[in-house]
């Protein structure tokens, strides 16, 4: 087993770096072919790399997109991130709190669950 496979945080860290760079090809390298992407707790939003890729191509067009890692913990093959994500919402630029739960298998993300808070729009002076 390589060190990448033994450290479940590695693929999570790498995909967040690619997310922040809005690099779809590098981002997708860290997802397994048959991965599942859920709105917590059990609403399937995307299954497989092609659906996850399509979902993020649109998101990566947002000019202010950035996921700020607040904390990360791992237990076994599960990784939990607390993030504040800056987005360009239809109503304007803002932030949203996100809890991300990842299940890692063979060095890639096999399943992910996302619990979103309510968006907080920036004031006009913060834009």
Image (tube, rainbow, N blue to C red):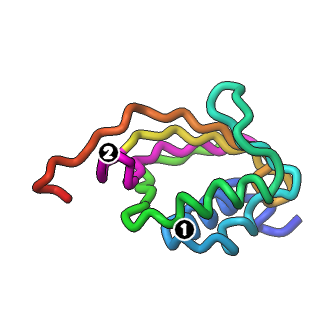
* Residue 83 falls inside the magenta stretch: yes
Give the quadrant of residue 80: top right
Please provide the residue range marked out in magenta: 76-95
Q: Position of residue 27 (x, y in %)?
A: 66, 67
Q: Position of residue 82 (x, y in %)?
A: 48, 43
Q: Toward the viewer: 109 or 39?
A: 39
* Residue 3 falls inside the magenta stretch: no
Q: Is residue 51 above or below residue 21?
A: above
Magenta stretch: dominant secondary structure: strand
| Element at label 2 | loop
Residue for point 53% across, 64% down:
60
- In the picture of the structure, the residue carrying the numbered disc 2 is 91
Which quadrant is the C terminus positioned in? bottom left
Give the quadrant of residue 75: top right
Q: Residue furthest front?
A: 90
* Nearest-to-viewer mark from 1 and 2: 2
Q: Position of residue 22 (x, y in %)?
A: 53, 70
Q: Toward the viewer: 70 or 112?
A: 112
- In the picture of the structure, the residue carrying the numbered disc 1 is 17
State which tag comes first along the sequence, 1 or 2.
1
| Element at label 1 | helix
Residue for point 69% across, 74% down:
25
Q: Toward the viewer: 115 or 5?
A: 115
Which quadrant is the N terminus positioned in? bottom right
Give the quadrant of residue 86: bottom left
Residue 71: in sight, yes or no?
yes
């Amino acid at each position: 087993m390589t060190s990448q496979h033994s450290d479940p945080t590695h693929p999570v860290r790498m995909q967040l770096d690619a997310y922040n760079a809005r690099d779809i090809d590098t981002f997708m390298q860290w997802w397994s072919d048959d991965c599942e992407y859920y709105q917590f707790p059990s609403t399937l939003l995307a299954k497989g790399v092609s659906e996850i890729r399509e979902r993020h191509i649109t998101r990566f067009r947002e000019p202010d997109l950035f996921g700020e890692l607040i904390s990360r913990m791992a237990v076994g093959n599960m990784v939990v991130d607390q993030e504040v994500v800056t987005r360009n919402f239809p109503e304007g630029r803002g932030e949203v709190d996100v809890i991300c739960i990842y299940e890692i298998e063979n060095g890639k993300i096999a399943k992910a669950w996302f619990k979103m808070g309510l968006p907080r729009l920036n004031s006009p002076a913060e834009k």
